[in-house]
Image (cartoon, helix red, strand yellow):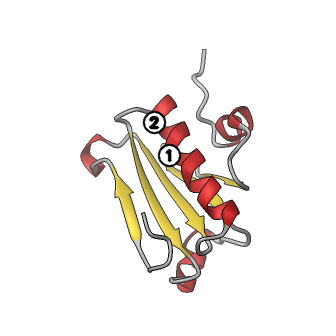
Amino acid sequence: MTLGRAHSRKSRSAATAGFELTLYISGATENSQLALLNAKNLAEKHLPGRYRLEVIDLFQEPRQARKHDVVAVPMLVKTQPLPVRRIVGNLLDEKRVLTGLDMLPHT
């Protein structure tokens, strides 16, 4: 994926998505690339076939920041299932991300 151009990428079809995720990044920075890689890896590991991931590059589409009140990037937003959850950072700490986005299985 080229981060130098404006893009909006969606993984998986909306019909099969149980989890709707949006990752806000800023250009091709190291932190943005790391967050993108980590978001993909976490989704494939914990939500295989049950997610849609949209990537929005705020460097190219700055007005999109208002959609989820983005104040820092990278930021991953889970909009479905409710409640909406946000987590900022490179998403390297798997347990922190899963807990913060309320994606751990409830027992």
Which residue of the protein is positioned furthest toward the top in this rendering? 107
Tell me if mark 2 has few (under 14), some (14-19) or many (20+) residues whose alpha carbon lies within 10 angstroms of its own.
Answer: few
Q: CA distance from mark 1 to mark 2?
A: 6 Å
Please name the residue shown 73% across and 69% down the image: 72
Q: Please determine whether, in this image, residue 39 is positioned above or below residue 73.
A: above
| Image quarter (top left, top right, bottom left or bottom right) of the C terminus | top right
Please name the residue shown 58% across and 52% down the image: 84
The quadrant holding residue 47 is: top left
76 left or right of 18 in image: right
Q: Are marks 1 and 2 in contact (CB under 8 Å)?
A: yes
| Front residue of this view, candidates 4 and 68 | 4
47 left or right of 83 in image: left
Residue 44 tag number: 2
The quadrant holding residue 16 is: top left
Tell me the kind of residue under disc 1.
Lys
Q: Please determine whether, in this image, residue 41 is positioned above or below residue 78.
A: above
Q: Please determine whether, in this image, residue 9 is positioned above or below residue 81.
A: below
| Place of residue 7 in the rendered image (x, y in percent of width and height, measured from the top left) | 41, 74
Tell me if mark 1 has few (under 14), some (14-19) or many (20+) residues whose alpha carbon lies within 10 angstroms of its own.
Answer: some
| Image quarter (top left, top right, bottom left or bottom right) of the N terminus | bottom left
Q: Please determine whether, in this image, residue 102 is positioned above or below residue 9.
A: above
What residue is shown with label 1? 40
